[in-house]
Image (cartoon, helix red, strand yellow):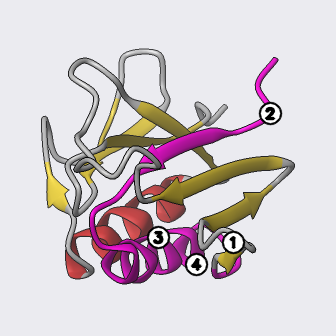
C-alpha cells in the first residue's frame, strides 16, 4: 500500500547519525542522499525518507503519529533502542518490553521529535 514514509528534519546531519545508528542495529545500511539532498533508508523493501521541509518552514513531529519498524528479534529491538538513545534519541513510553501478545517493542523520539517504535514478532 505505501511506497515510502517521509518525515521532516531541521538538522539532516543529526538525523543521519541517529538513523544510520538505529538502522545498523537492525541490520540495515547507512542512508543515501538523493539529488534533492534527502536522506533515504532502504530496508527489507521499505523506504524511509528524511528531508528539510520544502516550504522552508521548520520541521515538526506529528501529534499522534508513530512510525513502526520491524525487527528480526528481541535482541535487535534492544540494540535499536540503545543505538537510538546514544545518537540523540529520547526513550519514551515504557522501557523495551514484551507485550501481552508476545511481541517485543521499544519506543523512541528521534532528534526532531518524530515518534518511532520497533517491534519483533512473538516468539513461539
Q: Which of marks 1 and 3 is nearer the N terminus?
A: 3
Q: How far apart are marks 2 and 4 (CA)?
A: 22 Å
For the residues carrying marks 2 and 1, which lies nearer the camera in this image? 2
* Residue where numbered disc 2 is placed: 3
Which of 34/92 is in front? 34
Please give the name of the residue rendered at 45% of the width and 78% of the height, measured from the top-left corner. Answer: 16
Answer yes or no: do the residues labelled 4 and 1 have beta carbons within 8 Å?
Answer: yes
User: Can you say which quadrant of the picture contains the N terminus?
Assistant: top right
Query: Of label 2 and label 1, which has the lower sequence position?
Result: 2
Q: What stretch is highlighted in magenta?
A: 1-30
**Whether label 4 touches label 3, CB < 8 Å:** no
The local crowd at label 4, few if under 14, some if 14 to 19, many if 20 or more residues have their Cα within 10 Å, is some
Tell me the residue that label 4 is attached to.
Answer: 24
At label 1, counting other C-alpha atoms closer than 10 Å, the crowd grade (few under 14, some 14-19, many 20 or more) is some
Asked if labels 4 and 2 touch by Cβ distance under 8 angstroms, the answer is no
Q: Earlier in the sequence, mark 4 or mark 3?
A: 3
Q: Where is residue 56 in the image (x, y as percent from the top left)?
A: 33, 52
Contact, CB < 8 Å: mark 2 with mark 1?
Answer: no
At x 46%, y 45%, the residue is 7
Q: Where is residue 109 in the image (x, y as percent from the top left)?
A: 23, 50
- Residue topped by disc 3: 19
SS at badge 1: loop
Amino acid at each position: 500500500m505505501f511506497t515510502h514514509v517521509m518525515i521532516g528534519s531541521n538538522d539532516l546531519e543529526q538525523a543521519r547519525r541517529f538513523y544510520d545508528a538505529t538502522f545498523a542495529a537492525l541490520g540495515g545500511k547507512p542512508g543515501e542522499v538523493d539529488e534533492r539532498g534527502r536522506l533515504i533508508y532502504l530496508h527489507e523493501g521499505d523506504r524511509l525518507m528524511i528531508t528539510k521541509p520544502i516550504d522552508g518552514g521548520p520541521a515538526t513531529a506529528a501529534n499522534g503519529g508513530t512510525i513502526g519498524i520491524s525487527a528480526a528479534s528481541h535482541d535487535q529491538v534492544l540494540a535499536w533502542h540503545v543505538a537510538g538513545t546514544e545518537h540523540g534519541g529520547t526513550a519514551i513510553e515504557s522501557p523495551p518490553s514484551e507485550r501481552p501478545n508476545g511481541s517485543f517493542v521499544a519506543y523512541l523520539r528521534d532528534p526532531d521529535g518524530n515518534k518511532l517504535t520497533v517491534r519483533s514478532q512473538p516468539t513461539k
